[in-house]
Amino acid sequence: MHYKRFPLGALWTNGYLFWDEETKDAFFVDPGGKTEDVTKFMNDNGLTLKMVILTHGHIDHVAGLREFVPFVGDNIYIGRNDADTLKHPSKELQELLGVNFDGLEKFREVDDGRVIDFPGYTIKVIATPGHTEGSVCFLVTDREGHRVLVSGDTLFAQSVGRTDLEGGDWLKLENSLKRLAEFDDGLHVLPGHGPDTSIGSERELNPYWPR
């Protein structure tokens, strides 16, 4: 599996570029800020961006999205219940982070269980509301069967996403964590902020993990 992490934007949001070595097609998860470094890496390695997927609609995960629109058009996926957030982003959060993003109208909405096919990959949508109403995780599997979970702001290393912003709900987040607890300990996790982790590590060390 080929991927690279890019910390982007004011909050150093983890964006992830995945690509297929055979086709050189690539997709990006959560462009949270200016994307020059991502574009340079793609150009240097002969990669072609074909798709963007979003774990949720908060401004620190979508602020660089418009820079990718010329490459992907409307091939942008977000959980259905966060679609309005992408169309009408919070002015308060933009002012707080010093970001200007006027929203996006053309994109695609996905529901729980949807499988997105991409050259060399399958990407399963797992609805994990709590941080926002439409938060999702992506279970990414490559052609050799290797898997990673892209968890957005649902799950961090030894922590979880906050629930005190609009659309947040602690009880829903608890239920979402119970869904993630069904995965095996060896599953590698790529969070929206901070270092990588695994389901097993979080089962052992995360104080918010379902007991």
Image (cartoon, rainbow, N blue to C red):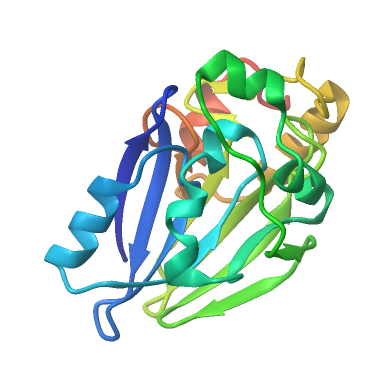
Image location of residue 86, percent across then percent down: 70, 46
Horizontal arrangement in the rendering, residue 109 relative to residue 2 (left or right): right
Based on the displayed image, in which of its 4 quarters is residue 2 positioned? Answer: bottom left
Residue shown at 42% from the left, 37% from the top: 33
Horizontal arrangement in the rendering, residue 166 relative to residue 92 (left or right): right
Residue shown at 19% from the left, 56% from the top: 40
Q: Nearer the viewer, residue 135 or 49?
A: 49
When the figure is inspected, residue 171 is found, relative to residue 192, above or below; the finding is: above
Residue shown at 34% from the left, 35% from the top: 7
Image location of residue 204, percent across then percent down: 52, 25
Based on the displayed image, in which of its 4 quarters is residue 89 positioned? Answer: top right
**Total tally of numbered discs in the picture:** 0
Q: In the current view of this chain or complex, which residue is farthest to the left?
A: 44
When the figure is inspected, residue 65 is found, relative to residue 2, above or below; the finding is: above
Image location of residue 206, percent across then percent down: 56, 21
Horizontal arrangement in the rendering, residue 115 relative to residue 72 (left or right): right
Image location of residue 119, percent across then percent down: 43, 83
**Image quarter (top left, top right, bottom left or bottom right) of the C terminus:** top right
Based on the displayed image, in which of its 4 quarters is residue 209 positioned? Answer: top right
Q: Nearer the viewer, residue 143 or 168?
A: 168
Residue shown at 81% from the left, 46% from the top: 84
